[in-house]
Image (cartoon, rainbow, N blue to C red):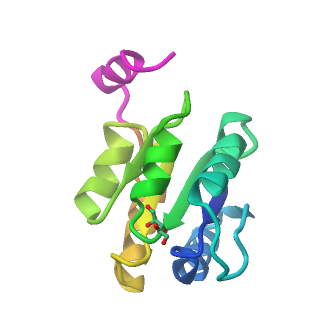
Amino acid sequence: MKIAIGCDHGGIALKSVVVTVIEELGHTVVDQGCFAKDSVDYPDYAAKVCEQVEAGNCERGILLCGTGIGMSMAANRRPGIRAALVQEEFSARMSREHNDANVLCLGARVLGPGLAEDLVRVWLTATFAGGRHQLRIAKFSD
Ligand code: RB5
């Protein structure tokens, strides 16, 4: 898969960890920035990543900010984006199996690198169960 990744200055510390896991799993990273620690606005990077997913250029997106909260709020405003803010492995798996999340949001000031790596691994490996879950997603999708 092609995975778009984006972060703000609060999330940049985790980006290299996430990129490494994505590539270890055999996927391709499409890096939408930011690329420095200067202060930037997280909605700009949420938009860049979501646009890649919406356009079909990337199957999934991963967004990193300090808490993951702002990125998840911004991403979930967009039709077709189902962004999951995740802090433990059960939710990472369920966001794929039940919610077909196409964007994962992580907080670099919340998670250690080891946990973040596990969350990305689980999220990229789990598959959507479909069936009744698809019907439920259709109820809030255009
Ligand atoms: C930036 O300081 C911080 O507000 C941002 O990374 C994020 O945590 C917002 O939700």
- Where 20 sits versus 101, above or below? below
- Where 102 sits versus 9, above or below? above
Residue 21 visible (yes or no): yes
Report whether 31 appears left or right of 19: right
- Where 72 sits versus 110, above or below? above
Residue 69 percent across, percent down from the top left: 39, 57
The front one of 4 and 7 is 7
The residue positioned 33% from the left and 56% from the top of the image is 92
Span shown in magenta: 129-142
The residue positioned 36% from the left and 84% from the top of the image is 112
Q: Is residue 15 magenta?
A: no
> How many labels sit on residues?
0
Report whether 139 appears left or right of 49: left
Q: Is residue 136 magenta?
A: yes
Residue 1 visible (yes or no): no
Residue 58 percent across, percent down from the top left: 69, 47
